[in-house]
Image (cartoon, coloured by chain):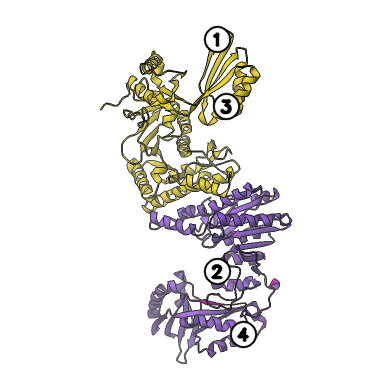
Chain colours: A yellow, B purple
Amino acid sequence: MALIVQKFGGTSVADIARIRNVADRVIRTYDQGKNNVVVVLSAMSGVTDKLIALAHEATENPDPRELDVLLATGEQTTAAILTMMLKDRGYPSQSLLGHQTEMVTDCEYGNARILEIGTHTITRLLDEKKIVVVAGFQGVDIKGNITTLGRGGSDTSAVAIAAVLNADVCEIYTDVDGVYTADPNVCPKARKLKSVSYDEMLNMASLGAKVLQIRSVGFAKKYNIPVHVRSSFSEEEGTMVVNEDSAMEQLVVSGVTQDLNQAQITLKKVPDQPGIAAKIFSPIAEAGIVVDMIIQNTRSTGETDLTFTVPTPNFKQAMEIEKKVAESIGAREVTGDTNIAKVSVIGVGMKNHAGVASLMFNALARENINVILITTSEIRISCAIEKKYAELAVRVLHTAFGLDREE
Amino acid sequence: MALIVQKFGGTSVADIARIRNVADRVIRTYDQGKNNVVVVLSAMSGVTDKLIALAHEATENPDPRELDVLLATGEQTTAAILTMMLKDRGYPSQSLLGHQTEMVTDCEYGNARILEIGTHTITRLLDEKKIVVVAGFQGVDIKGNITTLGRGGSDTSAVAIAAVLNADVCEIYTDVDGVYTADPNVCPKARKLKSVSYDEMLNMASLGAKVLQIRSVGFAKKYNIPVHVRSSFSEEEGTMVVNEDSAMEQLVVSGVTQDLNQAQITLKKVPDQPGIAAKIFSPIAEAGIVVDMIIQNTRSTGETDLTFTVPTPNFKQAMEIEKKVAESIGAREVTGDTNIAKVSVIGVGMKNHAGVASLMFNALARENINVILITTSEIRISCAIEKKYAELAVRVLHTAFGLDREE
């Protein structure tokens, strides 16, 4: 007997027929060895967007508290329907909404963080051998206001519940069948990973975010909950997201990602004085803009060129800020470029392998792809390159690190 | 400054444009003399039926608990949207769901009765000069399960809230502009009543149920809350439902109703013994069937014919029960007739006026309408007649009691 948390995304509960498939799967899991099963559901696909559109039809700027009240109806609907189906087929079951689950969050409407989950109610229902069906995505703040956890928040609901219940596994059912070594649309030879570590998954945001809300991976890592990402439309095993020691594959690099959503800004001929970096980056940080890569080229003249990247949607604002900064610190000029992309190789294996960086640079150089910026972390190396080379770079690196699927 | 509860029905919140009209009206009420306003909303018209259809698509017999979870989303949606609009226009406002309103009910899913309403939250919000928007129709049982109050339950939500807050008035906005002396579709000369007493309203179920859930009238009477039934599509005054002393019109009869939903059953030649009535009616009551009119014709032979009416949907079941009863008590035979209608005249004025019954019988006799059964209460006289005469009888009685609208 195991305790299994199963989360089904919007495409898995898109209509009555698909919810019926979910019921089949839940019942199979419940019957196998009399498992305890907690199901976490998203809204039917498209419903959350429809509700947001309705709110915008009603008002230009929907009030965040009330928007969450509205959005919470989506998961309430699917939770009620699945529970009806389970009971209709003779399986004891009960739905729980955010406040009934005691999913306590902060009061950041639309993007709330989980503070605490009361286990009393769920545990009581499981003791009664009931299948517990939780409305995902929703919580309740300490004052009893309904909150929601942001896009993909049901993943976080599921992993957080798995964590507090100390579940054996959290299964995330979605419309893709696992985590791939690269985006298969970009890299046809990408292959599905049997397992990936939490840290790799966290670093593969641009790949991973499509299958799993990144915030949920942090939870899984913190509480060491194995997460099984798999398709609700097949019986195939998906990808296990687990701790480093449990990862079954011993790859130097587990994935290659691209991020087309970065723009670079350069301040030229900045006086090279102590405290100058703070003057450049503090106003950006205060505006809530996240700086990703930074490079500084010191010249012999005591001046320096400073280049960094920001997300494309923040580019215009960041440029305006830096033009003022440049004036105040006496920098020569500010230039910008949205024509860049970031490609990364990620893998816990690179900790123990020298030469990963040089292998990466050589592979790119062979294709005459110029590296503009470089950043590294313990398990990731990222290069900013010209945007037009992004897809080629992904394929080249995928081959260079031996990730290509065998034909 | 007054405390006003305003309830808007499904047609009044049928779409975004209509909800915008509701916002206009709520704001006008709030601004007039800085009133405290509590708004109670139904779901958009048709939504509850759609949700029920969805549940039936999912399962043959939707689980009552889960059906209530599903249905509650309808009022949650309208409450959130109206509140957004109010806030968008600069009016402080907050929505409250059933559990947030502390609308505590019994656990009769789908038809729950209100046990208690916590006033703490609403009062606090009103003290902050907020417009409180309550999702009608929904409550929560003592264990925290979502319940709903049955068809038209939002009326009861509104009146009950008005009662616990001791509101000055409970306004019920609907798609008709008040309570009429008869159904205008049957009796073209029917006119709108300026006021009607709680007891008259309770007796006018067949008229009143179209504009006001009858259960809500009981609440209004118990707590002496004036209820103003009016149209959300005009500025005209509607009908005040008030206590007898406050009723402005001094009519002998306030309304004429018809009920086509009754069937009669006759047990012939029943031995006239003590306890025989209990033997006949107990099994019917145990089956949950409500007997309305009863008449007993004692014969000189020590036998009696016993006739009574039941709602048409229960007719078949009641006939089967009575056939068994007839056998066991030695009655000659059981006959049934679904071809009857009940017409009633209702008015608190008849308490002080003799001759109402004879006026009624004479009016029907003039048209050769035969009276099959008669029942009376303090403020109502009802006759069962042949169904084909029902509409004619309503018009004749409407004229006879001086209710016809002046042309």
SS under mark 1: loop
Q: Secondary structure at mark 4?
A: helix
Inspect the magenta stretch and tell me whether residue B255 lies in it. yes
Q: From the viewer's perspective, is the residue at label 4 or at label 2 nearer?
A: 2
Distance between the alpha carbons at the discs numbered 4 and 2: 25 Å
Quarter assignment of residue B115: bottom right
Name the image quarter holding the N terminus of chain B: bottom right
Q: In the picture shown, does residue A277 fall above or below B333?
A: above
Please tell me whether mark 1 or mark 2 is closer to you in this view.
Answer: 1
In which quadrant will I find the C terminus of chain B? bottom right
Rendering coords of residue A172 (x, y %) = 40, 37
Report which residue position mark 3 lands on: A318
Chain letter for mark 4, please.
Answer: B
Judging depth in this view, the residue of B316 and A306 nearest the camera is A306
Q: Using the numbered discs, state the Cα–Cα distance from disc 3 to disc 2 in whole angstroms.
A: 63 Å
- Give the side of residue A293 with respect to residue B54, left or right: right
Q: Crowding at label 1, few (<14), some or many (≥20) Cα neighbours within 10 Å? A: few
Gap in angstroms between the C-alphas marked 1 and 2: 87 Å
**Tags 1 and 2 on a common chain:** no
* Distance from the alpha carbon under mark 1 to that under mark 3: 25 Å
Mark 1 and mark 2 in contact? Answer it, CB < 8 Å.
no
Can you identify the residue that label 2 sits on?
A: B209
Residue wearing tag 1: A299
Q: Nearer the viewer, residue A381 or B72?
A: A381
Please tell me in which quadrant of the rendered image residue A280 appears: top right
x%, y% of residue B143? 53, 51
Q: Is residue A260 visible?
A: yes
Chain at tag 3? A
Task: Chain letter for mark 2, please.
Answer: B
What residue span does the magenta drawing correspond to? B246-260
Mark 1 or 3, nearer chain start: 1
Q: Give the chain of mark 1.
A: A
